[in-house]
Image (cartoon, coloured by chain):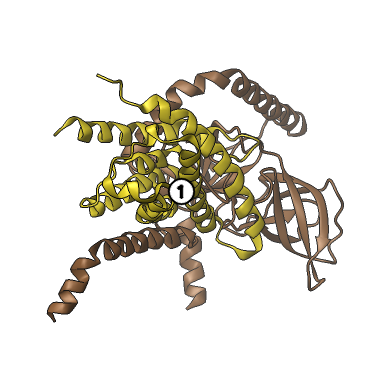
Chain colours: A yellow, B brown
Amino acid sequence: MNSEVILNIARFIILVFSQVLIFNHIDFLGYINPYIYILFIILYPIRKEEKGQFLFLAFLIGFCVDFFSDSGGIHAAASVSIAYIRPIVLKFVFGNIYEYQIIKISNTAIGQRIAYLSIIILIHHLILFGLEIFSISHILSILKNTLFSSIFTIFLCLLIIPLLRKPKT
Amino acid sequence: MQNIIAFFLRNRNFFLFLALLSLALIFTFQSHSYHKSKFVNSANWITGGVYESMNNVTSYFNLKKQNKILVEENKKLRNILFSIQEEIPDSIIKDSTHFLNGYKIRTAAVIKNSYNRTKNYLTLDKGKKDSVLQDQGVITSRGIVGIIDNNSRNYAVVQSVLNSLSEINAQLKNTSHFGTLKWDARDQNIVQLTDIPDIAPIAVGDTIITGGRSSIFPKGVPIGTIKSYKLDISENYYIINVALFNDMTSIEHVYIIENLNLDEIKQLENTVNE
């Protein structure tokens, strides 16, 4: 057990609890809630050989949030989807340096960071609200929820990421 | 054959992704079906325990408001009590064990409430241990809240009226025309009453109560008042927007109604159906 495993376990638990106890009850303007637990998926260390494990952890964190919010499997489905497409998004945003696995999200340029966060978060929220509402006649409220919640989540993620940076030794 | 195995090994992450995604979708669609025991629910001991300990802290913050609601209810009940005593001569003793013709009331505290999604559920701090079972009605002093959907030993999950899967029998207080109460997931204070025939005389402000045909709620539990109405596409039935009496965004204490005659009613219905 190295320090990185412990860090990720701690991050997993803290993000699930802060999501279900705090961020699920913000109700900004009556219905807008941020889903910051996907920071776990966004910040998970990039390594090619452990992709299966990463998919499973993404599923697990979504599933934990589902248990707390009585929502079936919508968070699990959205989380596992963004975990699967994350390499594609990383390559799209950061180009080929991603291949050398030297990216730390907290060290990247602000423009690239916002692009990466926005793509991942928009896809996650679209799947989430699409599955939750699950009706073509409510397509407008799916899009409205996706847009406003995404803006809130992106904003909070940009604020939280610098806080999670490890102190330099 | 080797090629096939090699193909699976090469794409094992894709297949793992498909397996996990379909598992998640199975749980999702299981939760979309009405009244079926669900595997994923917040009545288990971990989630229930977390919400209960959180509620132990947060419930202090609106004690004042809850006290006010309690006093209001006591005032209402005292009014009823005193007017009954004036009407009836003192020789009649009411048998309190037959209160409400075979319904039993229990109390519970709400430890988790949600109201801003399309399928909302509340979690209560009472479960099987306290005889809180599936299909019992949940009300507050002001009006209905929902129906018990899932339970564990110590906790229960309530399917709120603010849930697009809910269908509750309701009627007009004045004329006894009955219909079905649903929610279109747009406004947290407005639910829809459908299937009221167009010959029913209705007006804005009329009171809607539960109908008593469902064996879950007794007849006459208040729901709300008519806010607006229109005819549906076939022009035979009204779609009525009902403003709820309950403020679904702040519910702390609820009453759970158990129908003591439920088994007998179900047995009878089964023999009729056969």
Q: Looking at this rendering, what residue extends furthest in the front direction?
A: A96
Residue A91, x across and y down, in percent: 38, 52
Q: Is residue B209 visible?
A: yes
Q: Amino acid at mark 1?
A: Ile
Say which of A132 and B46 sits in front: A132
**Circle 1 chain:** A
Q: Is residue A13 left or right of residue B108?
A: left
Seen in the picture, residue A77 relative to B158 is either above or below; the reply is below
Q: Residue at x 58, y 58 (%)?
A: B214
Residue B111, x across and y down, in percent: 46, 33
Residue B213, x across and y down, in percent: 62, 59
Q: Residue at x 13, y 34 (%)?
A: A1
Q: Is residue B19 left or right of residue B162?
A: left
Residue receiving disc 1? A120
Residue A52, x across and y down, in percent: 24, 54
Seen in the picture, residue A111 relative to B182 is either above or below; the reply is above
Say which of A50 and B85 sits in front: A50
Q: Is residue B112 visible?
A: no
Seen in the picture, residue B24 relative to B144 is either above or below; the reply is below
Give the quadrant of the C terminus of chain A.
top left
